[in-house]
Structures are given as structure tokens and as C-alpha cells.
Image: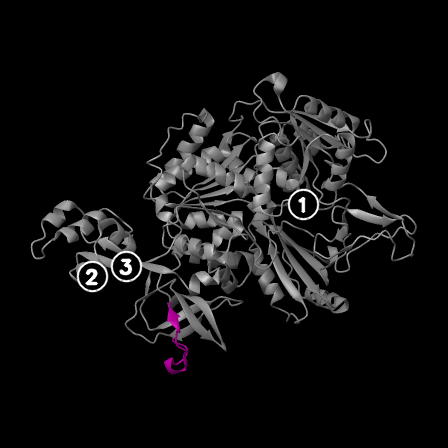
Amino acid sequence: MKNVNSKEVSVLVSGPFNEPFDYVLEDKNTNLSIGQIVLVPFGKRKIVGIIIGDGTKTIPETKLKTILQVYDFEPIPKPSIELMNFLSSWYCVFKGLVLKMILSPIEAITSPDYEKVYKSNFLNQNEINEIKEIKITNKRKLVLDFLLNLDIGKSQNDIIKQTGVSKAILKDMTQKNLIQEKKVYKTLNLDSHFLKNSKENKKNYDFLNLEQKFAVDRINDSIIKTKSDCFLLDGVPGSGKTETYFETVRTCLDQGRQSLILLPEIVLTPDWEKRFFQKFSFAPLVWNSEITKKKKKKIWLSALNGTAGVIVGARSALMIPISNLGLIIVDEEHEQAFKQEENVRYNARDMAIYRSSRSSAPIVLASATPSLETFQNAKSGKYIHLTLPKRATGATLPNIKLIDLIAHPPGKGKWLSPLLVGEIESKLNNKEQSLLFLNRRGYAPLSICNSCGDKIKCINCDTWLVEHRSKNILICHHCGYSRVFENFCKKCGVQGQIKACGPGVERIEEEIKETFPKARLIVLSSDTMNNHKILNQTVEKIKNNKVDIVIGTQMIAKGHDFPNLKLVGIVDSDVGLSGGDLRASERTFQVLQQVSGRSGRHSKKEEDKGVVLIQTYDSKNPIINAIAKNNRNEFFDKELKSRQHANMPPYGRLASIILSSRLERKLETFSSELLKVAPFFKNVKIFGPAPAPIYFLRGRFRRRFLIKSDKNVNIQDVILNWTRKINTPNHIKLTIDIDPFSFM
């Protein structure tokens, strides 16, 4: 990292700031580097920031405030600073807010734990034997022999325990320059990642099939040559994508470099961790919202000083300042969860690709159902396309059938067709497991009064309250508002006329209990699986055949392998196909394809293959039929043609401006004023302002602009120049969303 040559330095601080502030360093002899973390006074506060260069010299030195503290550990690496600058520019957010994410958690910055370690000053035994000016006593020799060939060194306690020497001996040897004393930040015994590395348990990967081996070899070549290639690892569900990229992580470890693995949701990590440990005999460092601040602190410091070999986490893990990054994996790269929709809006997958390019490290995007953007980039040759067309276990792909609910309707008050019920019964008789998929939490998505027709809505949002009968409450899934369920209409005053409309997973559970009272069943949703421990236990129960029927939402659609699961029943495949969402068709196809892939993952005989039954009222829908025919590429090609015709992503660009306020009329006025100063360009179209699909959300009224442009347009500059033409009142919140995923 480049040194700073002046005692006046520019410091970017954490918070809503784009430009740095000049400070002066009290100690002129202190050597500083770009990326050095410092504590500075800011008004009446103390704020953490990083040095980004020499001072601007625009303010007299006498008027500059003094840096309070220079933290004694490695500077933020250059690729992380470049990521901060690029993310800020691309998504139109303050650099200081991105920095705040990088420097999270603050505890890792302000109070690092460190210990003294000792290293030998000699590279080999011959150098020790050649020492003439200092007598090498037996005790000194014990220490030197113990420390020989150790890159990281050993703590004082470790040396005393192993050699039996005193503290005085170590102090004396330090003074005589036989050994050196160094401060090392405490980690989670991470040296095992490299000192006890994969060479010791290196395995021949003959168990991989030809396609997997080809993929491993191709990615490994980029790791060894430090090339920032972008790979799409495109394999059918059960094709062994995880096992494939595990072998590339092994190569990265052998090269002495760090790996970052991004998973879309923390619920996927328990099973994934177990597989990782079985493969490598050590646990990766897991970064997510559930781990303690203390643990985050240790992981953050370990990543910065290079001792963290493998870090796995959700999207925020991308912001960890990893000093020697050699490989990035984005698993289930198509997942919407990689797009952060609050505060700093960014897509972790896209930013991971950028970070890969700045770190001379390849990136692997893994998915059975890639996003259309990724698929098109692979198709055009921008990404390297690696395909895994068959299941790794040799299992056959499931037999997929449609159930036309018009021809085979469920009974009165029921939601499962007789054909699906019959197949569940068959699997129960064969002691095989079934999965029923419905992407709706709770008992019913809508409660309505039969007397007056009033739909029970949230007080903070333009949305219906969802009945959760197991808890006897109504919940808003957008803001979290809840109230006790009462069979009483507050509008017309009639008692006992509140009716549940539509099914949620709890309602399907009720129907299964009534139909198969002896079946062992479990509901897998974020309401029932609200921590790692419960999820882990549940997954193990399913794998050990202690469950007959699983009823689940989207959280069961991916990342899980249940050997005895032979039937997947999709209760309502039509959910998600309506509305004007650009990605509605794509997302529906992805989730249905993913959940279908859970069936028969270990069935190697034709007569034993898995079954997928898809209930639909629209059996001619092209998305449903593409899944039934197992013809993903046909669907993708049609969808891409449609996007191209409309100049939509990946062929064009989209951005949103979302305006919100608690004052509805003032919001409408400001929206109109902003429209009056809107730019006019031939290849830029502005739609709106229009009420957002969810107009009233979390107590605020919302209006949206949608900006559509050609791909070569700098849409960020267009928006920033436009919004700067008018002052935004304090009561208005203006949010820019580049490459939006959600249109709500």
C-alpha cells in the first residue's frame, strides 16, 4: 500500500459523506499508509475513518484538527478501497456509508485484541550453527529449534510450555536479536487453514465425473495464474456444484491465498458447513447476522491480517477487508437475497465480480437456474461457461407432470388435488418422503368479512394482514405489525364472519393432518425455523427418515439434499406469475426448477426415479410447461428475446427513484416539481411519477420514477444531474435504486 508523505492527511470517515476531511498527525515520525485506520474528532463526536491520501493543503495547518489515534494493524487493502469507490459511484451512494459497512463491526476497529508472539531470526539450522558472537546455550537452542520454520510464530505461553524456559530467557534472546517479538491479533486458531493446509489431507478427486473434473481444472488454472476470470458453473440440481468448487477452494489454500464464499441466506449454512468440515477437516469462518460481535471482530481481523483461509457468509461478507483474496464463489448467484434493498442498495453478486477483477482472483457464479443477465453473459462469451448436465450421484432426473386443477380440482375446502393426495399416499406406503411446496407463510394470505366484504389490512401499509393460526395472530409481512386474531369485524361489527382466503403452509399442514393423521410431518418456513440450531435439528430429522412429509416455503427450495425424498408436490405454481414485475417469470421459473430438483436426487433406477407434480390452473403457461419438459434453455431463450425486444435488462438499463414521505400532499407536490426538471435524452425514457405498487409502506406514502435507457448510457450521471437540480425537503426521503430487483 502506498505511503503518505505528509503529516497532513485526507481522511474519509464513516457516515453520509462523499469527500474526505483534512487532519494533521501530531507525531511527524509515524509512518502512514493509504488505508490506515484512524480515529478522528468530528464535531463533538469521535469517528473511525481511513487515510486516503495526503492532505489537500487548502486549509492552514493551524486550523486542522489532530488525529486522535492510529490503529496498529494492517491498512485496508487496496481492492477493498477500490470496491468502496466503485460501489459508491455505481449505486449513487455516499462513500462514507460504504466505508461504514467495510469497517463493521466497530468493535473490530476500536478495540483489537492482540498477543505477543516470538519468531526466529534464522531461516534454517545451518544459520544457527554459524553463530559465533553469541553463545547458544541449551535453553536458547531449545527455543530456536522450536521456532524454526514457523511463519506466524508462537506465543510466550506456548514457548514456555513446550521448552520449559523462563520469560527472562525470551527477553534476553530478543535483546540479543536471536528472536523477534511481534504483536499478532488474536484469531480463531486460523493458522490451521494454512499451516495444516489441504496438502496434508489432499485427496485424489477421481470421485468427480468428467464434467466436474474439467470445471475444476479450468478454474484451478485461473487460480494458479492469478487471472480474474469469471466462470458460470451451471449444473442441474444435484450435479455436484458444491463438491466441484470445494476442490477449487483446496487449490486456493494450497496457493496460500484466501477464499470468500457467498451464500444467499444464512439458513443454508449449517448443512453446508457440515459438508465443508467433512471435506477439509476444519471449519470455515462463518459471517452472518447471527454471530456475536466478539466473533465478528475476530473474523474481521483475521481476514485483514491474512490468517483467515476460508470465509463464508451472506452478502455483507463481501465487505470484509480480505488481504490476500485468491478466489470468490457466489453460490445460487441468481438469488434476489444478494440485492440489498435497504440503506445502501447494492447487488453483492455484481460487486463480487468487480472485486474479483481488482484482486487478480477468479470468481465462480454457481447455479442450476442462472439469472438471465449471467446466462446471457456466458452465452456471449463474456463469462466462461462450465456445464454439469447430469447428477453427480448418477441419479436420474425426476419425472415431472402437470396436474390441471380445472380437470382434477381439490375437494371442497381443500387445496390438494386427488392426484397429488394419491401420490403422497403411495410414497407413505413405500416409506418414502414427500415435500409439498407453497411459497406462502402462515395460514392464509387474506382474511375477509363475509358480512361486509372488508379485507383486514395493516395500519402501516397498503397490504393485507396474514393469518398465523398457530399463534392466533395477524401479521404484516412487510413492517412486522401484528395483532391478536379476533373473529369480529371492526368495520361492520358482525361477530363470527371472518373468513380465511387462500392457503398458506399452515393450512396445508391442517389438510395433511386430516388426510394422513398418522404421518410424521414438519413445516419448514422462516416462522418455524428461526435459528440455526432448530434448522440443523430439523434437517437431520429429515435425512434420518424421522419425517414422512415436509411442507415448506422457499427456504426448502435449494441447498438441501434429502436422500429418501421421492415426491415434490408444488401446491400453487401460479403464485408469482401475475403482476407487472419484470423478473416475475424468471423468479417463478427459478424457484419451481430449484424445488423440483429436490426430488429423487439419489434414485439411480428408472422405476425408482423421483416424481414432481405441479398443480396449476394454467396448464398452457410457457413457464410451467418449460419446467414440465425440463427445457430450461428454451424458456431462457424466449425470455431473452422478449427482453431484447423491449430493450430491458440485460440489453438495456433500468433505475428507480423512490420518493417517500409521511405527508401525502407534499409528496405529490415534490414529485410533480421533480418531473418538471426531468432531463430529455433520445435514448432515456422516464416513467412516472406513479404511486408505488405498495403505496403506503411502514407509515410512509411512496411514489416512483422508472428510468429506462440504452445500455451504453451512464444512467447514474443522468439521475444525479437531475436530482441535484432541486432541493429535497427534509420530510422527503429520496432513494436511488440502480438495476432494481424489486418493483414494489
Identified at 28% across, 72% down, the residue is 29
Relative height, residue 207 to residue 229 (above, below): above
Q: Mark 1: which amino acid?
A: Leu
Tell me, yes or no, if residue 692 can be seen here: no
Principal SS element in the magenta part? Answer: loop
What residue is pinned by disc 2? 168
Q: Nearer the viewer, residue 420 or 622?
A: 420
Q: Mark 3: which amino acid?
A: Lys
Quadrant where the image shows the N terminus: bottom left
What residue is pinned by disc 1? 582
Element class at badge 2: helix
Q: Is residue 626 left or right of residue 236?
A: right
**Magenta stretch?**
57-70
The stretch drawn in magenta includes residue 45: no
Relative height, residue 219 to residue 725 (above, below): above
Alpha carbon separation for disc pair 1 and 2? 71 Å
Q: Is residue 459 left or right of residue 191?
A: right
Element class at badge 1: loop
Tell me, yes or no, if residue 654 can be seen here: yes
Instruction: Name the residue furthest bottom.
Output: 62
Q: Earlier in the sequence, mark 1 or mark 3?
A: 3
Relative height, residue 188 to residue 634 (above, below): below
Element class at badge 3: strand
What residue is pinned by disc 3? 182
Q: Bin the neighbour count of mark 1 within 10 Å (Cα to Cα): few under 14, some 14-19, many 20 and up.
A: some
Q: Are marks 1 and 2 in contact (CB under 8 Å)?
A: no
Identified at 37% across, 41% down, the residue is 253
The stretch drawn in magenta includes residue 64: yes
